[in-house]
Image: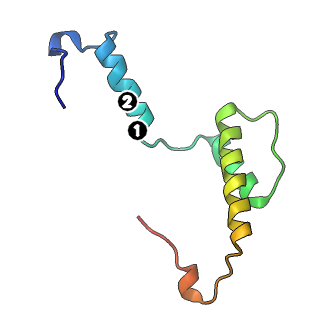
Amino acid sequence: MFELWSQEISGSGTSAYYRTTLTRAMTEPRPLTYDEHKVADAALLGYLPDPDWTDSAQEIYACLAVAIVKGNATGFTPTGTRDLEGVSR
C-alpha cells in the first residue's frame, strides 16, 4: 500500500501513528480478558447475564447467546463420532 507519510512524521503522536494503531486494533485478534472468559463460560452453561459485567463482556455474552439459540434451532444432532471431531487451527 502506498504511504503518503514519510518516516519522520509517522512517529508516536502523529495521525499516521494513530491510523496504524487503530487499524491494527480493529483487524488483529486479541486474547479475551478474565471477565470475558467468565462470561463465555456463563453463556455456554446457560447462566443469566449479570448487569455488573463490562460492556465488552456483555457483548460477548449476547453474541454467544444468539449463536447458541441459532445452533439449537437448526437441531444439530451428531450421528457418529465423525460429527464430533474437534476443529484445530
Tag 1, which secondary structure?
helix
Residue type at mark 2: give it. Thr
Residue at screen point 71% across, 46% down? 62
Give the percent coordinates (x, y) of residue 24: 37, 32
In the displayed structure, 3 sits above or below 60; it is above
Q: What residue did someone put label 2 on?
A: 23
Crowd rating for badge 1 (residues with CA inside 10 Å; few <14, some 14–19, many 20+): few
Crowd rating for badge 2 (residues with CA inside 10 Å; few <14, some 14–19, many 20+): few
Residue at screen point 31% across, 10% down? 14
Residue at screen point 67% across, 76% down? 76
Tag 2, which secondary structure?
helix
Residue 27 has which mark? 1
Image quarter of residue 6: top left
Q: Nearer the viewer, residue 7 or 1?
A: 1
Q: Residue furthest front?
A: 74
Residue at screen point 72% across, 53% down? 65
Q: Which quadrant of the figure contains the C terminus? A: bottom left
Q: Which quadrant of the figure contains the N terminus? A: top left
